């Protein structure tokens, strides 16, 4: 399973979905899907904009967690 830590990062920076949308130019629905961890896919430019905004690496936003299955 891939875990998305966008909600944690937004909390650490005291940002709302609207703040991230305004700062990155990304669609609110894209940010909401990542925030709620129900996105089916993500575009490379979205990753780039989030990494620029939070001054981080991709692995700071996403984490692979081995499934018990």
Image (tube, grey):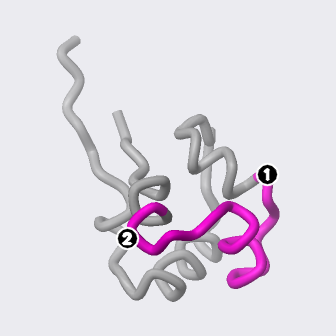
Q: Is residue 5 left or right of residue 59?
A: right
2, 50: nearer the viewer:
50
> Callout 2: 10 Å neighbours few (<14), some, many (20+)?
few
**Picture quadrant where residue 26 is located:** bottom right
Classify mark 2: helix, strand or loop: helix
Residue 10: in magenta span:
no
Image x and y of residue 6, in percent: 47, 58
Q: Quadrant of residue 59?
A: bottom left
Majority SS type along the magenta span? helix
3 or 66: nearer the viewer:
3
User: CB atoms at circles 1 and 2 under 8 Å apart?
Assistant: no
Quadrant where the image shows the C terminus? top left
Please state if 57 lies on the left or on the right of 20 as rendered: left
Of 44 and 4, nearer the camera is 4
Residue shown at 29% from the left, 51% from the top: 63
Q: Which residue is mark 1?
A: 29
Magenta includes 12?
yes
Q: Which of the marked residues, 1 or 2, is nearer the chain's N terminus?
A: 1
* Magenta segment: 11-29
Q: Is residue 16 above or below residue 66?
A: below
- 12 versus 57 height, above or below: above
The spot of residue 12 in percent (x, y) is 39, 68
């Amino acid at each position: 399973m891939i875990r998305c830590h966008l909600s944690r990062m937004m909390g650490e920076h005291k940002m709302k979905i609207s703040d991230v949308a305004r700062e990155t130019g990304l669609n609110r629905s894209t940010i909401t899907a990542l925030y709620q961890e129900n996105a089916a896919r993500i575009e490379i430019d979205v990753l780039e904009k989030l990494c620029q905004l939070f001054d981080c690496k991709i692995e700071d936003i996403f984490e692979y967690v081995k499934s018990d299955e």
